[in-house]
Amino acid sequence: MAMEKWAFNRVQTLADSGIQTVPPQYVRPVEKAHHDPNSFQVPIIDLQLPFSPEKHDHIYKDQYDSIAAQISSAAESWGFFQIINHGIPDELLQRLQTAGREFFDLPLEEKEPYANLDGVTDDRFEGYGTKLKCTSDGRQGWSDFYFHMVWPPSLIDFNKWPKHPPFYREVTEEYGRQVLGVVDKLLSAFSINLGLEESTVGNALGGENLEMELKINYYPACPQPDMALGVLPHTDMSALTVLKPNDVPGLQILRDNEWVTAKHVPDTLIIHIGDQLQTLSNGRYKSVLHRTLVSKDKVRMSWPVFCIPPLDLVVGPLKQLIDENHPPLFDAMTYREFKQRKKTKAKKQQSS
Ligand SMILES: O=C(O)CCC(=O)C(=O)O
Ligand SMILES: [Fe+2]
């Protein structure tokens, strides 16, 4: 029966079955004890002040420069920071989370029609799913997900968005628009700090054709949380990722060779530098290695928005940053090729 075919593919189904031990494919390698989550504070940057330097007078210019410098320094030393006063209304963030949660709370047979087949090498990977065989030895993360485009409108296929709850579309479209505003500000700040025209980094990512994909991660409660991981260690292929987690901590980044947990700070959005920005900045900004922990009795969820260049745009180190003393550290290639290479590399690691 179809139900049975689905039944063990979803981590949520496995968790709901009441198992008390984690099956072997979810067990992570033994490692040192974790850092105390309370001792780790990710840089928090306040975006309250007016942002575009040319639109404001000198008073704002100084404040702008100071915020832009904070953003850049966090991107250089951490590859990771949080922003407050980002301008996205709290009510919208709450509704976004309610919408995602209501979808995942649906019975399996209402979610499976949106399934995306794992392993399909489509250019665009949209729908409901579970990542299978993440590592060479077939290890898996304790999570299910939903993926779909949120920008630009011309690339959105609403048939691939959840139709339940009914307010999902309105809330998520609005969230996409608002995230784009925040991303514009951040990309301008990176340009200025690299000593370039405000629009340079944004243009190098496609300008008006910059794309955004939303992922919803669903990490069920896990009977043996210390043995599993939600998502396994990775860097994001995006240029920039804007992430809203629910209030269950779990995101970790690798810093000085140690996995450290980001303390949950309400009302912030988390920003990750991804591989494309690392390439564009010729390594000045760091694409940060990260992973997630799971909880014994709480569902963790997160909503990353991946900002990516169009598939056929060539991304390489910005030529303004290259000279005799600063040779290019990364190859230029289309985003499509970058994705294929990264996947092939992961597969080779699987088979070796
Ligand atoms: O859930 C999180 O906090 C991070 C998720 C993540 O890294 C990803 O989906 O790429
Ligand atoms: Fe990630």
Image (cartoon, rainbow, N blue to C red):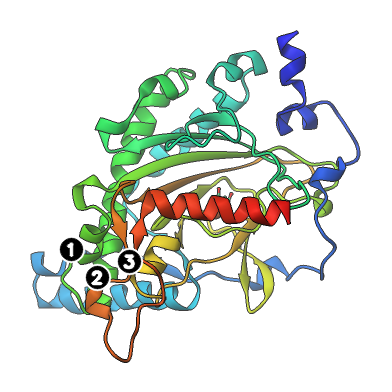
Q: Is residue 167 above or below residue 281?
A: above
Q: Is residue 194 left or right of residue 144?
A: left
Q: How many numbered circles does the render carry? A: 3
Residue 30 visible in the current orientation: yes
Q: Mark 2 — residue?
A: 191
- Residue 20's spot in the image, x, y percent? 91, 37
Beta carbon of the mark 3 residue lies under 8 A of ligand 2: no
Q: Is residue 291 above or below residue 208?
A: below
- Residue 120's spot in the image, x, y percent? 55, 33
- Quote the CA–CA distance across marks 3 and 2: 15 Å
Q: Mark 3 — residue?
A: 316
Please tell me which residue is depicted at 43% across the width and 23% down the height of the picture: 160
Q: Secondary structure at mark 2?
A: helix
- Quote the CA–CA distance across marks 3 and 1: 16 Å
Q: Secondary structure at mark 1?
A: loop
Amino acid, disc 2: Ser
Callout 1: few (<14), some (14-19), or many (20+) C-alpha neighbours within 10 Å? some
- The residue closer to the viewer here, 75 or 23, is 23
Q: Is residue 143 left or right of residue 270?
A: right
Quarter of the image for the N terminus: give it. top right
Q: Mark 1 — residue?
A: 199
| Viewer-nearest of discs 3 and 2 | 3
- Quote the CA–CA distance across marks 1 and 2: 7 Å
Please tell me which residue is depicted at 76% across the width and 48% down the height of the picture: 139
Query: Which numbered disc flags the more N-terminal residue, 1 or 2?
Result: 2
Q: Is residue 63 above or below residue 266?
A: below
Callout 2: few (<14), some (14-19), or many (20+) C-alpha neighbours within 10 Å? some
Q: Quadrant of residue 41?
A: bottom right
Amino acid, disc 1: Ser
Please tell me which residue is depicted at 52% across the width and 31% down the height of the picture: 100
Query: Disc number at residue 51?
Result: none
Query: Which numbered disc flags the more N-terminal residue, 3 or 2?
Result: 2
